[in-house]
């Protein structure tokens, strides 16, 4: 399933429009559209709200974001390991 399809599937399974989802989490329909189309990443606060109302973990809704975080974290850890003692 492509990256944002999980969010769309969860929203449509609840028979919610983008506008209805937006109103439930305090954002705009345009913002939901941008997130679903991969043109914008949600803030952590917004991702948490989506996790709650869509009943799906953030990691599953936005795996690309969490993959980037883990990659960055691993790279930082590797840099620390390579510093001279």
Image: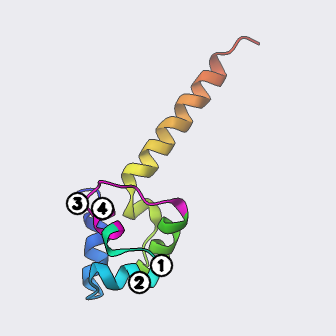
In the picture provided, is 8 more to the left or to the right than 46?
left
Residue 34: which disc? 4
User: Marks 4/3: CA distance?
Assistant: 18 Å
Asked whether disc 3 touches disc 2, contact meaning CB atoms under 8 Å apart, the reply is: no
User: Marks 1/2: CA distance?
Assistant: 5 Å
Which residue is found at the position 33% from the left and 62% from the top?
35
Indicate the position of residue 81 as horizontal and vertical percent values.
Answer: 65, 21
Residue that protrudes farthest toward the right in the picture: 85
Magenta span: 31-44
Which one is earlier in the sequence, the residue at label 2 or at label 4? 2
Indicate the position of residue 4 as horizontal and vertical percent values.
Answer: 29, 61
Which one is earlier in the sequence, the residue at label 3 or at label 2? 3
- The residue indicated by pointer 2 is 23
In the picture provided, is 26 more to the left or to the right than 64?
right
In front: 37, or 63? 37
User: Marks 3/1: CA distance?
Assistant: 27 Å
Q: Is residue 53 above or below residue 1?
A: below
Asked whether disc 1 touches disc 2, contact meaning CB atoms under 8 Å apart, the reply is: yes
Decide: few, some or many residues near mark 4? Use Cα within 10 Å; few <14, some 14-19, many ≥20.
some
User: Marks 3/2: CA distance?
Assistant: 26 Å
Asked whether disc 4 touches disc 1, contact meaning CB atoms under 8 Å apart, the reply is: no
User: Marks 2/4: CA distance?
Assistant: 15 Å
Quadrant in which residue 82 is drawn = top right
Residue that protrudes farthest toward the bottom in the picture: 15
In the picture provided, is 57 more to the left or to the right than 3?
right
Secondary structure state at the residue bearing disc 1 = loop
Which residue is found at the position 26% from the left and 72% from the top?
8
Which one is earlier in the sequence, the residue at label 4 or at label 3? 3
Asked whether disc 3 touches disc 1, contact meaning CB atoms under 8 Å apart, the reply is: no
- The residue indicated by pointer 3 is 1
């Amino acid at each position: 399933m492509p990256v944002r399809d999980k969010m769309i599937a969860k929203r449509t399974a609840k028979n919610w429009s983008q506008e209805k989802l937006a109103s439930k989490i305090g954002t705009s329909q345009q913002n939901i559209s941008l997130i679903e189309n991969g043109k914008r990443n949600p803030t952590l606060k917004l991702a948490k709200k989506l996790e709650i109302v869509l009943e799906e973990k953030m990691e599953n809704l936005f795996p690309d974001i969490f993959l980037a975080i883990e990659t960055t974290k691993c790279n930082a850890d590797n840099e620390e390991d390579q510093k001279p003692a």
